[in-house]
Amino acid sequence: MNLAASPIAVALMSFGLAAGITSVLVPLVRALGLHFGFTDKPDPRKQHSTPMVRLGGVAMVFGFGLALAAVWLLGGFGLLAPARDQLIWSTLAGSLCFFLIGLADDLFALSPWPRLAGQVAVSCVIWSEGVRIGAIDLPWFSSTGSAIVLSDGLSLLATVIWLVGITNAINWLDGLDGLAAGVAGIAAVGLVSVSFSLHQVAAGFLAAALAGCCLGFLRHNFNPARIFMGDGGSYFLGFTLAAVSIVGPAKGLTTVSLLLPLLILSLPLADMSAVIMGRLREGRSPFHPDRRHLHHRLLRAGFSHRRTVLLIYVFTQWLAALALVVANAEMRFLWLAIASALLVGTVVISRRQLQTELALRDVVPSAPQEISDIARCGDRHG
């Protein structure tokens, strides 16, 4: 088969290779982490009772990079113009740099401000390499109906805020086993569909590889997790999602160009925004750890660890399906109907199960499950 003539085949190969490579490498990374003592020690705030390796992001980065390199060697990028080919490698370089910033935090416990400064610096370099928000198509603000071209200064500002914002939103979401990897994987699948609908195949290849490494890692990270991705992994996922949305949907300059990635990633972005505003209202630093995140609220409501993660999964997949409708993708209403049915069904069943469990606790008093889950929540970001 000529891969260059089949974008779908390239995307499927990127997905499969990334999933397979990541899944195979995770046990090796875990073994090395345990051998050299690169572990997260248990304490009263964390969910694990034994040392856990926090270097799972290493396997994800290798799975992502090796999958793209293999597809390139097999001629899969042959259908891309040189400029689009370059955007893929720029995105890969940026994701590696963000991973290294997070890895340094995993190993040396950096304070938030040096990490933020490093993220901004890398984002500026990536902007100079062409991964940028260059224009915004908002017809209700433009009498001519054409896209609003941003000056270099505004383009740089918008791009840095977008890259750094989404990166930290995914990082802060990484508070329960399997949560960040699952949400990022679902968002990546949504970006694959949206990118192909807008004929942005370069973004589709990147998103497919990202979805694959999320799936490969999730096999080892779903509750009860055997390894954590660490800040290196969550920074890698967040930056890559943000960059893919710029390379693809936001680059298409359609009427809803920036709405699509915003819609798919709205849950982690809304969660981060609400947490920051709550902390600022109390006169605290935006980085002050607390229990304001969505997953904390669901745990306090009485939902179990797994059920909390599942509820966030189904809501994310519903948002991705809604983005397909906005992008006017094929069979969009069928996918939205299926996603809506999954969302409603999961919410109804989870609520009934919760009510049953609460009733049983009233009959047989014991330590409330939600208190136990919150006490065991391993969110380093509060």
Image: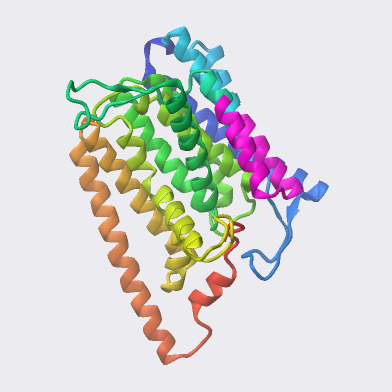
347 or 43: nearer the eye?
43
* One can see residue 26 in this view: no
Q: In which quadrant will I find the N terminus?
A: top left
Q: In which quadrant will I find the C terminus?
A: bottom right
Residue at left offset 46%, top offset 25%: 153
Magenta span:
95-124
Way the structure is coloured = rainbow
Residue 132 vs residue 373: left or right?
left
Rendered view: 203 above or below 116: above
Residue at left offset 35%, top offset 28%: 249
**In the rendering, at what x and y percent does residue 297 appear?**
44, 67
16 or 351: nearer the eye?
351
200 or 37: nearer the eye?
200
Query: Is 116 part of what is drawn in magenta?
Result: yes
Residue at left offset 30%, top offset 48%: 318
**In the rendering, at what x and y percent does residue 59 appear?**
64, 37
* One can see residue 69 in this view: yes
290 or 57: nearer the eye?
290
Residue at left offset 71%, top offset 64%: 42
**In the rendering, at what x and y percent does residue 20 appear?**
56, 34
Residue 310 vs residue 26: left or right?
left
Rendered view: 339 above or below 367: above
Query: Is 30 part of what is drawn in magenta?
Result: no
- Secondary structure character of the magenta stretch overall: helix
Q: Residue furthest right?
A: 36
